[in-house]
Image: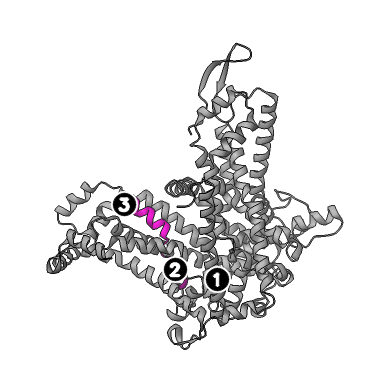
Amino acid sequence: MASKTAERRAVHGTGRVYWQRLGAEVKRDKWLYLLLLPGFIYFIVFKYLPMFGIVIAFENYVPASGVLNSEWVGFKWFESFFGFPAWTRYLSNTLILSLMNIIFFFPAPIILALLLNEMMNLRYKKLMQTMLYVPHFISIVIVVSITFVMFGPSGIVYKATESVLGHPINYMGSPDTFRWMIIGQTIWKETGWGTIIFLAALTNVDTQLYEAAMVDGAGRLRRLWHITLPAIRSTIVLMLILRMGSVLDTGYDHLILMANPLNRKVSQTLDVFVYEQGIKAGQFSYASAIGLMKSIVSVTLVLASNKIAHLLGEQGLY
Amino acid sequence: MKNKETKISLISPRTGKAMKISSGPVGQNRTPGSIAFNIFNYAFVTLVAVTTIIPFIYLIGASFATEYEIATRPMFFIPQDVSTGAYEYIFSSSKILRGFGNSALITVCGTLINLFFTVTMAYALSKTRLRGRNFFLNMVIFSMFFSGGMIPGYIIIANVLGLKNTYWSVLLPGAISAYNLMIVKNFFQGIPQELEESASIDGCTDIGILWKIVLPLSLPVLATFGLFYAVGHWNAYFGAMIYMTGAKEKWPLQVLLRELIIMSNGTAGDLTNMADDFVQPPEQSIKMAVIVVSTVPIMCVYPFLQKYFVKGVMVGALKG
């Protein structure tokens, strides 16, 4: 601190000179500060006030008494969550869904990007990309709506399975299919879009490597495995680190649309818990406590996976 | 595209003859393995791409079909007897029209608010001479990594600011995306200083410079970020769902869709809302037509979206 102050004094002068100068500079840039003001107020009100609002996780928040005057209860909400026998179910639902997402969805854009990269007919490749990016821009409500229209009891897929198997599958209202539907929707919506970042990384591959490998007699698959894949390894690691940070996020806007009383057993994740307890049941403090735990775990996981990436010799996130 | 084909000839070590090699991941396409790979690759990627598109084509086709045809015929794309009944129903339903109007209103006003807040702040932050600039920049960057979470945000908006059941509850909370702000700021920093300096010598204030010189030079950037924000507003439902519980007449299309299609479904959840929200499940063709109608605006801007969004992702990727 002291050295920083000294440095500032050296640059901007000391005492009265410093303040005079500061005043003159602020006056000179008064219009710039005016331009800064709306954004500054936005960040304070909508980003920083909610951060301080986290204190309600340790209070018994009642809207009437406000954030500052509500009763302080310490770790009561954390204790009551872990004292509640079903908490393991929320946690395991969250982790299973996340794990399925990492196993089935995470590799999908990588594989698709590698396949697109092997296409030498650039116009055809472009056409494919144009089709593949469409669902990314469709809202999640529409994606779920489309699923209901096609997989619901009067939908075309429902009727097709009924005529093939002889009995229908209740895609939209059964705990057995719930997770697969979620993963399927995610794959359908985001795989194409997810390829972009890998395709960008692939344009940087040194083509001499391919020539050298070809002279050595390496076939297509060998080149894919030994040149193309290693070239995007650091991007894959980076994306995986980012993904680790959201291992407890199951996408509440998606899950809330898909959850219903019939699949409750598997659809209740921590995100759904925060939404149901907080916004629907009005248990603001309880829900914020769970939300806070989630954020802490996420930050820890990002830091830990970044550390592991460093240990493995990768560049990591920072 | 660096790995485009560049032809070079080499002497094959095995045969001693000159052989043609095209560089790039594909290279020689002559070996049977390579041809088989190509066939598989093109077929597979085409299949995936068709799978992403086919639900839309089916929905468009079926939305023009009669209820009887949808119920009896398996997969089809062109209906036997074309009926516009579903669309007539939609465009005569004041509820859906109002939802469409609300979505349009929120998208237009929201995007203007986004651009105003983003541009003003980005311009101020693009000036390195600004005292306290680092403090403000760090404030923005920190908010990208840590947030208060769903509930404290809800409390600020609903209980502290009292924005429940107003359009402001969906317009203001997302007024600036920190990520977009940083990109616009970097763009402004790249504009040559000389232009602005000459204007300031002519007695222009900073606001005048932004309005008369910087913004006209940034129209493509404004269009790009306007599209980013507009798509976000058109597709958003969560904010309107949680903040406008008591103002159904202000619901955007996405929240109506949720009610019409997802919650009215036989298996639909959210039983707590069921009592007053329950609506008769509409016919399949009407559901399909509503989906089509709410997707049309996105499809209209899709060509621009693809062009600009891809670039946007690249900028982010290469910078990060």
Mark 1 belongs to chain: A
Q: Residue A12 carries which label?
A: none
- Label 2: state its secondary structure: helix
**How far is disc 1 from disc 3 in space, using C-alphas?**
39 Å
Depth check: give the residue in front, B83 or A204: A204
Q: Residue B188 carries which label?
A: 3
For the point 57% across and 31% down, the residue is B25
Q: Are marks 3 and 2 on the same chain?
A: yes
**How far is disc 3 from disc 2 in space, using C-alphas?**
25 Å
Viewer can see residue A196 = no
Q: Where is residue B310 in the image (x, y as percent from the top left)?
A: 48, 46
For the point 52% across and 74% down, the residue is B151
- Label 1: state its secondary structure: helix
Whether residue B177 is in magenta: the answer is: yes
Q: Mark 1 points at which residue?
A: A293
Q: Where is residue B266 in the image (x, y as percent from the top left)?
A: 74, 69
Query: Is residue B119 toward the left or the right of residue A66 in the image?
Result: left
Task: Kindly identify the amino acid type of the residue bearing the numbered disc 3.
Answer: Phe
The nearer-to-camera label among 1 and 3 is 1
Task: Kindly identify the amino acid type of the residue bearing the numbered disc 1.
Answer: Met
Q: Where is residue B152 in the image (x, y as percent from the top left)?
A: 48, 75
Whether residue A133 is in magenta: the answer is: no
**Residue A199 against residue A95 in the figure, above or below:** above
Task: Kindly identify the amino acid type of the residue bearing the numbered disc 2.
Answer: Leu
Q: Give the range drawn in magenta.
A: B168-186
Residue A42: name its quadrant. Answer: bottom left
Residue B204: name its quadrant. Answer: bottom left
- The crowd level at tag 3 (other Cα within 10 Å; few <14, some 14-19, many 20+) is many
Depth check: give the residue in front, A90 or B93: A90
Depth check: give the residue in front, A132 or A198: A198
The nearer-to-camera label among 1 and 2 is 1
The nearer-to-camera label among 3 and 2 is 3
